Image: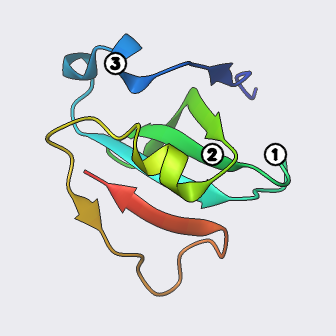
Amino acid sequence: MQTKDQLINSFSDINMKEYSMPIICIYNSPSDYKGMFVARLFDVNKPTPIILMRLTLDAIRSEIPVGFTLVPKSAGEDANIVESYI
């Protein structure tokens, strides 16, 4: 059973301490949100329903909480992944 996505206004609305290892993964135009940049919150390697959407990559990047560090994209990752923050 797939959980419906929960669109948030800001990651500041989320208590990151509730997650073992919060990771934010940014996608460019994923199949379910064509034309948008989507940041999805993961807990370690498990996706959560929490997403943030913006029209531009810079707008998404400006929403990444203080303390998160850029992790470059790895070979073999989904083609729509731009970058991740941990």
Q: Which label is found at residue 12?
A: 3
Q: Is residue 64 above or below residue 1?
A: below
Q: Amino acid at mark 2?
A: Val
Q: Secondary structure at mark 3?
A: helix
Q: Residues within 10 Å of mark 3 (few under 14, many from 20)?
A: few
**Residue 41 against residue 31 in the figure, above or below:** above
Label 1 belongs to which residue? 33
Q: Is residue 21 left or right of residue 34?
A: left
Count every numbered label the image shows and give the total: 3
Callout 3 amino acid: Ser
The quarter holding residue 50 reads top right
Residue for point 39% across, 12% down: 13
Read off the residue under disc 2.
Answer: 38
Mark with earlier residue (1, 3): 3
Farthest residue, direction left = 67
Dot 1, crowdedness within 10 Å: few (<14), some or many (≥20)?
Answer: few
Question: In the visual, does 15 lie left or right of 54?
Answer: left
- In the figure, 65 relative to 35: above or below? above
50 horizontally vs 32: left or right = left
Q: CA distance from mark 1 to mark 3?
A: 22 Å
Dot 2 falls on a residue whose secondary structure is: strand
Q: Residue at x 41, y 80 (%)?
A: 74
Residue 18's spot in the image, x, y percent?
25, 16
Q: Nearer the viewer, residue 55 or 6?
A: 55
Disc 1 to disc 2: CB gap under 8 Å: yes
Q: Looking at the picture, how far across and down is residue 45, in whole percent?
A: 39, 49
